[in-house]
Amino acid sequence: HANCAASVWKSSHSLDKSITLPPDEIFRNLENAKRFAIDIGGSLTKLAYYSTVQHKVAKVRSFDNTAKEASSEKLYEISVQEEITARLHFIKFENAYIETCLDFIKDHLVNTDTKLIKATGGGAHKFKDLIEKKLGLKVDKEDEMTCLIRGCNFVLRNIPHEAFIFTKHADSEFRFQNTHPDIFPYLLVNIGSGVSIIKVESEDKFERIGGSSIGGGTFWGLGALLTKTKRFDELLQLASKGQHTNLDMLVKDIYGGSYGSLGLTGDLIASSFGKSATTDKEFSKEDIAKSLLHMISNDIGQLACLYARLHSLTRVYFGGFFIRGHPVTMHTITYSINFFTKGEVQALFLRHEGYLGAIGAFLKGAEEDNPNQYSWGENYAGSSGLMSASPDINPMQRARSGTFDMLEMDRLERKLVNLPLLEDPSSYVPDTVDLTVDPLAREYWLFCFEDALDGVVKRAVASQPDLPEAVERAEKFRQKYRHKLQTLRQQPFAYGSLTVRSLLDTREHCLNEFNFPDPYSKIKQRENDAALRCYQKAVAALDALGWEEKQFALVRGVLAGNVFDWGAKAFFHSTSLLLLLFVPERPWLVDSYNQWLQRLKGPPHKCAVFFVDNSGMDIILGVMPFVRELLLRGTEVVLASNSSPALNDVTNGELQILTETIAAMDPIIQAGLKEDRLVLVQTGSSSPCLDLGRLDKELTIVVRERRADLVVIEGMGRAVHTNYFARLSCESLKMAVIKNPWLAERLGGKLFSVVFKYELGEPQEGSVSL
């Protein structure tokens, strides 16, 4: 097939439809596709479809040995099962490729239930006959504005780092904003040929409150007349090199400086193109384009500000082909909004702005499936991410971000909402360090993940010894993930803020992509078996201690268990050794143990929510004795663990079996389960880190119903890489051992430094800053 792939631009601007990318990497899972939607704009087509993806998941199942004590027999069996999940695919390409792409889809479309395709955008009527002829589907047109708003709501609700502000001269041009849990109300300023200003109040309630005929089409049309340049991208390229002060009359050109009594600085534009009437020289195309860009951007900016003020709206999103990731227009709009609102309103842009119409049209067609009742997550393994917006790159290459751009969204099993105990959900940022704005940290962690890649590949192959083709799949995983790391080196902002969490999650997505659902399953099983054999001895040793000694030993037990998260060593059978190993003497790097001990002398907590970390020693010999003590004090405990595997973290399925096994040996745990004072709930996550803004709704219901007043977070991924600065409305305890030398040094400590951070419902003094 003539494939639709990265185009090569010739000097004559003719399209060369060269074959460089296999189309099945673009139109993935077409054989399982149903429900299509298409949004055809002036130059780009966006295609959307829904597919079912079959992939392997690891499940654990208990052997029936609850009657026996932990014997040498294995506790549970691990089976790999096929699971079907839903995925949304969005693909963006130039209109020049539309016929080639329709041919490819026609040849690979197996599902014959699909009878129609939802269509939106100005080009929908123009290509209607071609689509109906090629695909044999009836084109059903949807209202453009409705689609736009639906799409906008969807990305704001499901993609945490969707919105960004643009800062031209910063190390990172893109500063991603945390999406407020309640996305409404907002103002959408859509700058296409003209400008539409829409106030959005809820999923279905929106109105066009104003607009202007002076928009992107005006810039393009006037620009073409004035510079004889017909291409939009070239106009922007000219503008990025121009000097508007050669044409624009500034305040200082009229008054010789600022106009103090009116509060106008000398550099302000007093009259766009004002010098051109009185000067006899020729003006460069670059300067004309720049002056025109300023004139139109400032006009739109002022209009947007007046409407925002009139309707008391502080969230203003900009979109439309005039914006579409172009740094020059994003900068001028940002500057204009900042000026007119004196910094009170920020201009917000969207990572997936170009897809909104297609997403909305798709959602309109899928209403019977009610896609909004689910949460969706971006699949990093199959999404292109945000491309660089640097104007220095050849505009022909930059403008179309490699011609083919993809976004994939996976339907999550569970509805995700924020933890009700967050002090302020709208200002909560899970990640401790933003690698997008910290080049030293970025370089270190990218190197770290690349360096660890061989080990991950080996581990993946070893986890499937009876599948000979595992080696080939692992190799594909290596290539895919290495390519992602290289992309992130060039474009750290590709998937929103770059963080250790996003690097870990991308790796998990890539492993799942190539059917390695749980590379650590056998290691976890071995470590759980070994740790269970020591449980009774460990608890007996703890119970023999005096009260104060015991409290300290319990904390050290959690910390010691937490050290071993890359595979516990088989020889740690001596309990006393375990409790002391690797945990340095106090004072620790972050140390509020005295305050914690003092608190324990007071009344018991009503209910503690414990976000757990690793399998093996950590959960069995560290966390469980700690939980047991809380139960003895009269505190209810909710154990929150991952819904599906990530590294060697314990999953909810594994934890159910482990807890039942421990209950058979320990009457306190047994009573806790029986009396419903110890409950196990899944977090809805499959990440080694923790986002308290996206948790399983069931968990948040339990937290509310039980009136939880203590949150315990353990482990480096959940308490240091994420949530180190998280502020909760109740007491919290964050415990971790720093097992990375670079991070330990960055925090002012050394390897195996301890973070023991006990906080009341407000931020504490004396915390280490990162």
Image (cartoon, rainbow, N blue to C red):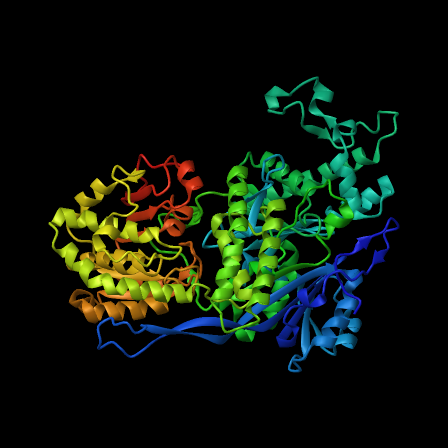
Nearest the eye: 536 or 611: 536
**What x and y, as percent, mark residue 631?**
19, 60
Looking at the image, is 193 positioned above or below residue 245?
Answer: below
> In this rendering, does residue 672 appear at all?
yes
Residue depicted at 54% across the width and 35% down the height: 343
Q: Quadrant of the N terminus?
A: bottom right
| Residue at the extreme top of the image, as rendered | 256
Q: Quadrant of residue 264?
A: top right
**What x and y, as percent, mark residue 315?**
53, 47
Nearest the eye: 37 or 440: 440
| Residue at the extreme bottom of the image, as rendered | 112
Nearest the eye: 434 or 562: 562
The reply, left or right, for residue 192 in relation to residue 288 is left
Q: Quadrant of residue 368?
A: bottom right
Residue depicted at 52% across the width and 37% down the height: 440
The reply, left or right, for residue 693 in relation to residue 581 is right
The reply, left or right, for residue 586 in relation to residue 46 is left
